[in-house]
Amino acid sequence: MATGQLFSKTTQALFYNYKQLPIQRMLDFDFLCGRETPSVAGIINPGSEGFQKLFFGQEEIAIPVHSTIEASCAAHPTADVFINFASFRSAAASSMAALKQPTIRVVAIIAEGVPESDTKQLIAYAKANNKVVIGPATVGGIQAGAFKIGDTAGTIDNIIQCKLYRPGSVGFVSKSGGMSNELYNTIARVTDGIYEGIAIGGDVFPGSTLSDHVLRFNNIPQVKMMVVLGELGGRDEYSLVEALKQGKINKPVVAWVSGTCATLFKSEVQFGHAGAKSGGEMESAQAKNQALREAGAVVPTSFEALESAIKETFEKLVEAGKISPVKEVTPPQIPEDLNTAIKSGKVRAPTHIISTISDDRGEEPTYAGVPMSSIVEQGLGVGDVISLLWFKRSLPHYCTRFIEICIMLCADHGPCVSGAHNTIVTARAGKDLVSSLVSGLLTIGPRFGGAIDDAARYFKDAYDKGLSPYEFVESMKKKGIRVPGIGHRIKRGDNRDKRVELLQRFARSNFPSVKYMEYAVEVETYTLSKANNLVLNVDGAIGSLFLDLLAGSGMFTKQEIDEIIAIGYLNGLFVLARSIGLIGHTFDQKRLKQPLYRHPWEDVLYTK
């Protein structure tokens, strides 16, 4: 492996298995370091393509999303680092696929628990093809002031505190990602900071070893000293011992192997990582520390003394003139995310939508403040849900039952009415459910099913003004307006609409007052004297009875009643009800596999 520097200020990576926070942290680090281009060139999300919006400083950018590793590498040939956030189940396969791409030079495997046999295959392939594997079970690595992998070094505050936004003189390598953060901080306190830091991962077989990176650091001119943090278990540290003995390393190495407390336990102890388990005396922390000390590394007497050892080594290099003071720079301020700023009380932002009928922010959605589970547990029905979502209150049972009856009675009126006809034609044209439904709903208006609001409006206005049925009908006639809710193409005075009769029977038995309905009946009596088809139709019945529901329940003010009618609540009932039938017609045509509809010539009058 050896060679030298892995990353630079122009290094770009491909990120496998989209995770918003690690990518955003990489981009924030880029901005902190003054990079001109984002370090994440592309995202690989199997089965997905498109873009993901993220922030690069103050600017919002769109990072391409690719469905395959091959497509991503082809689209971003200069991206030579592969950051793998796949689970342990698929990490090996995706990492191998990345290693086989000619453009990929470094693969970082974040997952812990990758099968050891798979890891060995990855290591063998990487060595044979002169590529680098960091991990598995790693947080990654960082080139101070240039590039970092995923969540390496944690939050921006920690990165600034550790002075990782600009390069120092220390090369650091550890098995532990968590301890890396601790040592970045320690090194920043007593030296000019990190130049490069790598966490090789805590699994038994890491893709690259402590000595691999120390030998690499030795070839980087900017690295003046190395700090190594090992742990009990395995024999990785002994390859570093051999390198020191053979004189392959000519820069100071400060090292410590954690796990000296293992000797206090009577039985074998597992310390966190899969590899942190002593398999004999040579794998103990004490034996490794002693071997490193004898090979020439600076090894303190305890972990607590490690900071002092690092400080003393650094100061000697400064005194010898081998390290020049680093010029401190002030990193730019990372723009704070709006959500974070709002939570901390630093800013206030206007909302874009107002909602008063439902809330989905708690443990379960609520309708007008009533938990959804409560609605089910109380055995409430569709009418109750409508009362909560439309009227923002729990209406009496007779009201919600009336709403449900209206829905049942208006659900369908056969295939010949305009709405059903449109839906059937659309469904037979091969269109989907929503398209077929909408084509039928678009016919609803003043001439088809949309007269309920108008009927309620005119009946209320006439009744409240004290107009007699004669005065009301004749005044409408003078205005050239047909009385909404009166008249039917089929029904007659001697063949009433059973739907109207059912609604009237229910209202007379359950409503406190039916004054508006009785007024509508009086109007019907007058209109029938003019023509036998001028009967009260279902629109007029629902319109007048809804007025009685609103007024008689005592739960609505006059202003609220006027607003409900003006907004179009009552036509909403017809739209909701008829949607049931239109959906049924769509399914019916699909089930029957009906062909494209063509209107017959003989049913068309062709004229000039």
Image: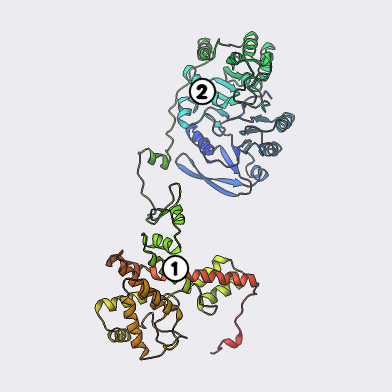
Q: Residue furthest left?
A: 466
Q: Please tell me which residue is depicted at 67% across the width and 16% down the height of the picture.
A: 283
Q: Residue furthest front?
A: 509
Q: Please tell me which residue is depicted at 32% across the width and 75% down the height of the picture.
A: 514
Q: Residue furthest top?
A: 294
Rendered location of residue 59, percent (x, y):
46, 43
Q: Is residue 487 positioned above or below 307 on the image?
A: below
Which amino acid type is marked by label 2? Glu
- Give residue 467's mark: none
Q: Please tell me which residue is depicted at 72% across the width and 30% down the height of the picture.
A: 120
Camera-nearest residue between 220 and 47: 47
| Disc 1 element | helix
Which amino acid type is marked by label 1? Glu
Q: Quadrant of residue 10?
A: top right
Is 372 on the left or on the right of 200, as rendered?
left
- Give residue 404's mark: 1
Is 535 on the left or on the right of 608, as rendered?
left
The quarter of the rendered structure image containing the N terminus is top right
Rendered location of residue 87, percent (x, y):
63, 38
Residue 451 visible in the picture? no
Q: Quadrant of residue 74?
A: top right
| Disc 2 element | helix
- The mark nearer the N terminus, 1 or 2, is 2
Instruction: Answer whether labels 1 and 2 touch (C-beta < 8 Å).
Output: no
Label 2 crowd bin: few (<14), some (14–19), many (20+), radius 10 Å: few
Task: Give the residue number, with chain letter if any, for mark 2.
Answer: 182
Camera-nearest residue between 63 and 463: 463
Label 1 crowd bin: few (<14), some (14–19), many (20+), radius 10 Å: some
Rendered location of residue 250, percent (x, y):
63, 13
Q: CA distance from mark 1 to mark 2?
A: 65 Å
